[in-house]
Amino acid sequence: MFALSNGAHAQGTPRGTSDAAPQPQPPATKPTAPQPAAPKVTMPEMLKYSPAEYPAEARQKRIEGEVVLKLDIDIDGKVRAATLEESAGVGLGFDEAALAAAPGLLFEPARKADGNPVRVLILFKYTFELAAVPKPQTPEQQQAATLGGLDGVVSRVEDDSPLPAAVVKLTLADGKVLTSATDAQGSFGFEHLPAGQYTVDIAVAGYIPWTARETVTAGEAITVRYRLQRTQPTAPGVIDVLVEGERPPREVVKRTLTREEIDMIPGTRGDALKSLQSLPGVARPPFIAGLLIVRGSAAQDTVAFIDGTEIPLIYHFGGLSSVVPTEVLERIDFYPGNFSAQYGRAMGGIVDVGLRSPKYDGYHGMAQLDFIDARAMFEGPIPTTDDWAFLIAGRRSWMDAWLGPVLESAGAGVTQAPVYYDYQAALEHKWDGGKLRFSFFGSDDAFEIINDTPPAGQPSAVGSLGLHLAYQRGQVMYQDNIDERQRLRWMLAVGQDDIDFGLGQFFFNLNVISVSNRIEYSNKVLDWMTVNTGLDFQAGITELQLRVPAPPEEGQPNGLPFSVKPPLLVEQLRAFSRPAVYAEVEMTPVKGLRIVPGLRLDYALDTKKFDLQPRLNARYDITSEFPRTTVKGGIGLYSQPPEFQESVDPLGTIGLSSNQAVHVGAGVEQDMTEQLEVSAEFFYKHLYSLVEGGFLGGFDNVGLGYAVGGEFLLKYKPDDRFFGWLAYTVSRSIRQADEEADEVLANFDQTHNMTVLGSFKLGNGWTLGARFRLASGSLNTARVCDPANEGCDPNAINAIYYGPSGTYSALPSSASQQERLPLFHQMDVRMDKKWKFEDWAFTFYLDVQNIYNNQASEAITYNYNFTERSYVSGLPILPSIGLRGQF
Amino acid sequence: MSAATKLRRVPKLRRVPKLRALAARHWRLPLLMLLVLLVGSALSCGSTFDPSSDVQTLRVISVTAAQPYPAVDGTLALRLTFSDSIKEGPRPVQVTWIAGCVDPQGGSYLACYPQLIAQFTALATGQPPADGSLKQEVLEVSSSGVVGATTFEYDIPTNILDSGQENDFGVKVSTVVTFFAVCAGELKPLLGEEDTNAALPLGCFDTDGHRLNARDFVFGYTQQYVFDDNRANENPPAGGLTLDAVALTEDAADNTVVHCPESAEEGCGPPAASDCTSYDLKVLVDDVAETDPDARDEEGNVLREVLWVDYFAEGGSFDGARKLISDPISGYTSEFNTEWTPPAEPGEVRIWAVVHDNRGGISVVSGLVTVE
């Protein structure tokens, strides 16, 4: 965001000194780098003016002048540095006087939408004017002296050309609003204004709105000049919860959601990460599984990070909640494809979540409680310091306290509920241009039932049935803007993953201790070229203990219930290492064009294979002015090494290579109106060298496939009353076990997926939102055909009886994954009421998922001999009432 | 890379692929889906399917081999217990046995289909195989429910081990697959009607030529193993059934129970009707699990078989129809009894208990109850 206020040419008696004084100008702000379409940043406000001394020679010669300085204002509002932006041009000491006075200025710091202070650069003008010789006033002049005026020009920041049709709103202290609009020359004006403080709001389509405060003095006419910055074009594949603004996008598609939007999306319980599932390109996961199925890829092909450190899961059990609460998020970068070379080891998408900085300006806290979980957060500066701050947050589900009795009274078979918790802690030190942060975060999900009665068909599956997924990460992150052209980022993390599953005598325990290290050095070698180079290293030790039903020996019948098979114990301790290096060049050779070629080299110690992955992304603003039109595209190679159990002894096959994917994407973005924008992206993923498990042999890189589709987003950007969007994805995802095999639809293929959502501000703190989803049903291999389908033989025998076990086995089907479950549709509604108090706010909300209780079909079950079938229904209506207080 | 791997059971490449296939599935998704299914089952009362233990159609109760591990020069002797429990009463059923498929490719019964079709075609042309590998008979209605109502014998080929493979412990072993069909009509080939690579090659037709469904037709197979070391596996001895500690017999008058006026559903909470009386049903099995020389624990000790029992009845419901008798970890348990709630309709009800071990050994016992 960039805006320059050039106002306050005092026409009467100069302020400051008795006869001449430089005039303070309301600050204009320019963040250190262009920001994408962003939540409005509150600009610095001057608290203390520091007058410049009028040069004696100039005063003597009665010469006036203007000096524009660039001020570097830190998060405390102090002027860290002042440089000359525009000289007075006449010598005589104007420049020197302004530079000498600037360090004495003090501001209320600029703040982001969440209230965090932010360091900014602003332009500030000292105007040196001499006092006019007072003349006797006429009676008319004496009357006019009780009123003032304000006029000015609105122009574009990039070339200072006039900006017509901008709406200028002037709000008086009593709330009265005057409105005007700029003419073809960008000019506007207000006359006969009572003296006092005014708020000026400038808005024009395609430009970031600007707000300024002006003081009108009786008898004076103020002339101001506002320069507005064009809304940044979005870049592919990224969603920022809070926009950092320091890093230009390197990717092809970017969609920005503000946190205010995410808080109001129905059906997510205000969970930012869950909002990902409402975006184009993300398929609805089956049942309530918290999976991200991106552009036709399997869930495990999309990797999640927290500040560059990989985490094993992004959603708690059942997808009810993400593992990082929204309150501690700085940003969510979501790349559905064609992601930067800084990311690798994934063929699907990337989710990189950034924890935000603690607040330095005082102590803040938040507590929230709803039916599902309770959470709290506290943060603030470390006492006696002004550049250290901390944040601590935690969340725990409490469904187990009430769901069990409810299920028991309903006569359900399982009366236990999963328990999850997560936590985040950070200690941060900030300095001019950089920060050092120590973080510790993790998540734990556990579910256990004591099963006295074995499930049908599994006589030996008695005892404890438990599932436990947990991870912890300790992370050090260092960022430093070495100078205006160089930047260094470093992240080191150590962590532990625990994955435990037990059923009776069988168990699966995996413990992974890992180290990950990322270093990236950026250098703006030319004004139009920035080079990013980095190291991305992962290593660790895995300890696996596995007691599973042994594969049948000769003499042991196949087809027995797994619980009656002899146990097989496997213990394995193994080290792994997967280093990578990358380089990427961000080029803007001409206005509106950004080209980002990149190269990444991965190595996997377990496969002893290198993967060289060239990538190229580009975007071009055909029209930079409103209505903006942008085209974009990308192509690249993406490698994903095999899972460890596929590539190492004793379970895997030695000599495997990585899975490979070629991502091709292209799209267009178009502003329709000031609030409405539309985008369309098309993708094609060619998949090859996929690891497939052979029926009789081991694994081999023989799998093939592709995913193709289009994503469309019609978005109404937030205004005073409404925001919402319509997202639609059409796609097809195909796999082949090998070249000779038939093409089959991939497990998570979802032809159509549409989400419509909107949120209305009803006033007086009330907000009402709704989300409607419509998606193709999941694919199934139906063991019993649907009698309603043409060609279904109700007399068909679908299973064969197996004597040694006394059970039926479904006959092999030649129609794998060929039956779609019925169309999925669901409506979620959310109502918020917020009360604001002087120092804190309180919110009550009601979030109802599946409000009309659609019994969505999520799977098919069969009777014992596969003569009957029945749909398994998904979640019923799920209301959640929440309370939230924050200060 | 450093690696330290302990595989307690001796691994052989032949076996590993199956384990690979098990491990190939990414852990996150299956675990999540398992949890999802658990939660799903918690939120619903399950399906309304009739349980397998409720015998109301033409059903095969058990197929028992006299010797689950027949000797190289021995005879494969099979006994089949079935029940035709449709409301209209038992019908004459045609039972067909087709044996002789040895060591099919990949160990899959599907690889036996070509041989099966050839044998059956020969029967249809009046030239059944001379080696006794095919037998067809029609059983009278009185056979329904009777333990071992029909038998079949087949001489094990003397060269059966020629195509066998060594197991993990160096013992050569072969398998013989035997198909059976129980049809309340006439068995006919389905050639040309379906893809016989995967679907059934035979169908059951009524006198009008209409194809019958699973209510009137059971097609299955059993599988026995022949070891080079001539090892044996005895069927787990079952000493009969007791109902509230009283032995069940073939005389229904010996045991009389009170009917349940309202139906009691299995597996989804207790029966709604408070007037129903449930009875303790138990099969008599001692601690008879044999050692399985091919099953070892973490320390290499030989493990015992797993034993379990499946209860069946022509009416009523069980509070758990499959019960564990013994497993290698927890050993023998005496709590393999179940609660049986009689049906709403008075009459004679047959109850079966089929005791399995995990090496193909099976015993079946049965008795009648009068429901008043």
Image (cartoon, coloured by chain):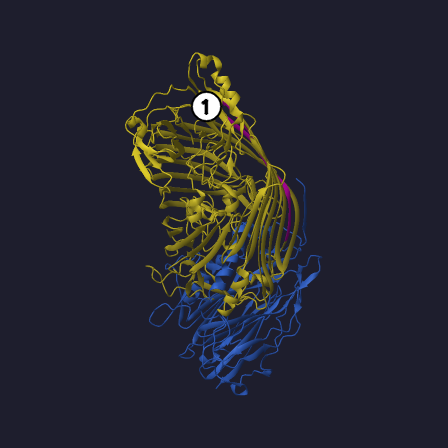
Chain colours: A yellow, B blue
Up/down of A816 relative to A52, above or below: below
Counting from the top left corner in percent of width and height, residue B291 is at: 67, 65
Quarter occupied by residue A630: top left
Q: Main secondary structure of the magenta part?
A: strand
Closer-to-camera residue (B161/A287): A287
Q: Name the amino acid type tagged 1.
A: Trp
Quarter assignment of residue A14: top left
- Residue at 49% x, 38% y is A660
Horizontal relation, residue B144 to residue A827: left or right = right
Q: Chain of mark 1?
A: A
Question: At 60% across and 73% down in the image, what residue appears?
Answer: B336
Q: Is residue A533 magenta?
A: yes
Q: Which residue is mark 1?
A: A528
Q: Is residue A19 above or below residue B13?
A: above
Work out whether residue A91 can be spotted: no
Whether residue A487 is situated above or below residue B102 in the rendered picture = above
Closer to the camera, A365 or A67?
A67
Furthest residue in direction bottom, as rendered: B253
Nearer-the-camera pick, A793 or A384:
A384
Give how far across and how far down residue B105 sits, in percent: 52, 54
Residue A94 seen in this snapshot: yes
Q: Where residue A420 sits: x, y (%)?
A: 56, 55
Residue A641 or residue B69, whichever sits in front: A641
Residue A123 position, x and y percent, is: 45, 26
Circle 1 crowding by C-alpha within 10 Å: few under 14, some 14–19, many from 20 = few
Q: Is residue A853 positioned above or below A160 on the image?
A: below
- What segment is highlighted magenta in the picture? A520-545
Q: Quadrant of the N terminus of chain B?
A: top right
Count up the numbered dots: 1
What secondary structure is marked by label 1?
A: loop
Which of the 4 image quarters holds residue A467? bottom right
Q: Is-magenta flag for residue A494? A: no
